[in-house]
Image (cartoon, rainbow, N blue to C red):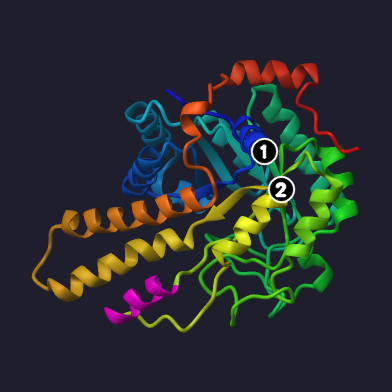
Amino acid sequence: MALITLRQLLDHAAEYSYGVPAFNINNMEQGLAIMEAAKAVDAPVIIQASRGARSYANDIMLAKMIEALAAIYPDIPLCMHQDHGNNEATCMTAIRHGFTSVMMDGSLEGDAKTPASYEYNVEISERVARMAHWVGASVEGELGVLGSLETGEGEAEDGHGAVGKLDHSMLLTDPDQAVDFVKKTQVDALAIACGTSHGAYKFSRKPDGEILAMSVIEAIHKKLPNTHLVMHGSSSVPQDLQDIINEFGGAMPQTFGVPVEEIVRGIKMGVRKVNIDTDCRMAMTGQFRRIAEQNKAEFDPRKFLKPAMDAMRDLCKARLEAFGTAGHASKIKVIPMDDMAKRYASGSLAPKTN
């Protein structure tokens, strides 16, 4: 099997100057669509599951599904990542069930709603990193609160998201604080706040520098050139997918996501992991609606799911190609987690912050 840690994958991405989309899943169909896309373009992949997905699908089912995907596609390096862990238990149980990487989102308190203090974030992120590194697993931290610079609010996703109005400074990661955070926590990757948010309704207009602060990414990368940066809430919410959903009975108001060209620009400034969920949901949902409208007598779920899988596969393939991930799977020799644990213990994987 080709299960890989996030740290090894992002180290490779940095060496060869590409980014890796991280696709969220809840079920088998999504997993197969992602892996088919990766196989088609010889790309490594990150598959991630939120706490909501783990509750929906069950940890054992998810673990066995990832094990099966790794066996079916043995030549594709696959990182299984816990998205937005809210405490130590969430992260450690994920590792126990075979996740090779976890995110400890200490930007919010354990309720996953209340913005946390910087001290709290540092303390809990360091603790999770220390525990995960003992077994060779990778850790992603977050500094700054995910939310809209237009509205000053976060967007809940699977029960995770800041509630209430947020101070503008909370919505943008401070570059100097980022240096201190990485040094103290020893995280392998850093998710930053730059105006992106969860869900489909990110921006009311095509984003510019006022509402999508790519300059923050550039400033952090200058101070932390060896730290892998992560963009959350980075679905592009394509117009054609909005149109398909609305043509067949949907009622999505006009909305804008993060343009692919902006993500590509971010990759040139040190972004190595790009979270994508909404685009995949929209690709599948559009096909559900189309088939239900065009074939009203249809009742076989497979007749809905197969076209939906094909649409998601094509979406994932397009992102793997756009981000430069394509063509790299066969170049990676996967390092077992036990060996990664030894490297952490030796200090060879400590982040370089100066």
Name the image quarter holding the C terminus: top right
Q: Is residue 254 magenta?
A: no
Quadrant of the image occupied by residue 240: bottom left
Q: Which mark is residue 14?
A: 1
Which region shows up in magenta? 239-248
How many numbered callouts? 2
Q: Residue 152: image x %, image y %?
A: 72, 76
Left or right: 289 in relation to 106: left
**Of the pair 272 and 104, the residue shown nearer to us:** 272
Q: Which mark is residue 338?
A: none
Q: Residues within 10 Å of mark 1 (few under 14, many from 20)?
A: many
Q: Are marks 2 and 1 in contact (CB under 8 Å)?
A: yes
Q: Which mark is residue 270?
A: 2
Q: Residue 56: image x %, image y %?
A: 41, 51
Q: Residue 212: image x %, image y %?
A: 69, 70
Quadrant of the image occupied by residue 1: top left
| Mark 2, secondary structure of its residue | loop
Q: Is residue 241 magenta?
A: yes
Q: Residue 247: image x %, image y %?
A: 29, 81
Left or right: 12 in relation to 229: left
Left or right: 342 in relation to 306: right
**Of the pair 26 and 293, the residue shown nearer to us:** 293
Q: Tell me the residue at 37%/37% (across/down).
A: 39
Q: Tell me the residue at 8%/70% (across/down).
A: 297
Most extreme residue toward the left, as rendered?
297
